[in-house]
Amino acid sequence: MATVEEETALLTAEEFAKRPDSGMVEELVRGVVVMSPPPGIRHGFVCLRLGKLLAIHVDDNDLGRVIGNDAGTITERDPDSVRAPDVSYYSYERLPRGDLPIGYHATPPDLACEVRSPSDRWREVVAKVGEYLKAGVPVVVVLDPEKRKAHVFETDREPVALGPDDVLRLESVLPGFEAVVGDLFG
């Protein structure tokens, strides 16, 4: 008996960027659009809180730019993946002063931060962290609002889990930045 296989064309990062807004949270994973439901109010609060603290430190020390709102970074090519950190930091070395580029920047950020959503599975979060690190992001922070923990992943180092009373420090990319983990959750 003959079978017919439907072949789905894989999107490039550039094609993905030109798609109309679906109203959903989307990422491109190995050429395929993956959607997830909007994560909710607590997620938005934690993203903004972390972004604000990072931006104050970065601006006060004239270090670079903090980017929010799932701006997107290319983590793989052929097939392409575009992941959307909730908050990211680019030093001026990686994203020079001047007008910001339109679309996805070719260089990965110095720091990618993810806030775990109610729909996120830990296995998927760890896979995304691995993509960021492999793409050249030196530090990835995952905040877990439900457990009030921060997980810090750095290239060539063991992951570190921090509880609500611990202090988040990002010395390798943001010297002098400190935040009590529990304060990030409100």
Image (cartoon, rainbow, N blue to C red):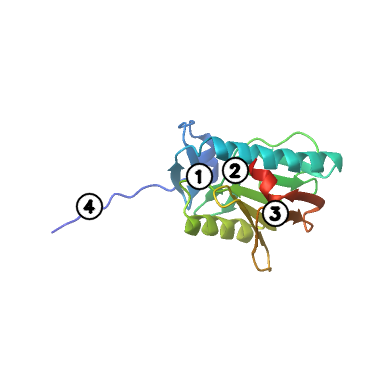
| The quarter of the displayed image where residue 86 is located | top right
| The quarter of the displayed image where residue 60 is located | top right
Q: Give how far apart the Cα atoms at labels 4 and 3 are.
A: 57 Å
Per the image, the residue denoted by label 3 is 165
Residue 100 at what x, y percent from top left? 72, 36
| Viewport quadrant of the N terminus | bottom left
Specify the label residue 4 is tagged with.
4
Per the image, the residue denoted by label 1 is 27
Per the image, the residue denoted by label 2 is 72
Q: What secondary structure is marked by label 2?
A: loop
Q: Give how far apart the Cα atoms at labels 4 and 1 are.
A: 28 Å
Question: Toward the viewer: 173 or 29?
Answer: 173
Q: Give how far apart the Cα atoms at labels 2 and 3 are.
A: 31 Å
Q: Residues within 10 Å of mark 3 (few under 14, many from 20)?
A: few
Tags 2 and 1 touching, CB below 8 Å? yes
Q: Which one is closest to the eye, mark 4 or mark 1?
A: 1
**Residue at image coords 45%, 44%:** 33
Q: Give how far apart the Cα atoms at labels 4 and 2 are.
A: 35 Å
Q: Amino acid at mark 2?
A: Gly
Label whose residue precedes the other's in the sequence (2 or 1): 1
Label whose residue precedes the other's in the sequence (4 or 3): 4
Question: Toward the viewer: 159 or 99?
Answer: 159
**Residue at image coords 70%, 58%:** 138
**Residue at image coords 44%, 45%:** 34
Q: Give how far apart the Cα atoms at labels 2 and 1 are.
A: 8 Å
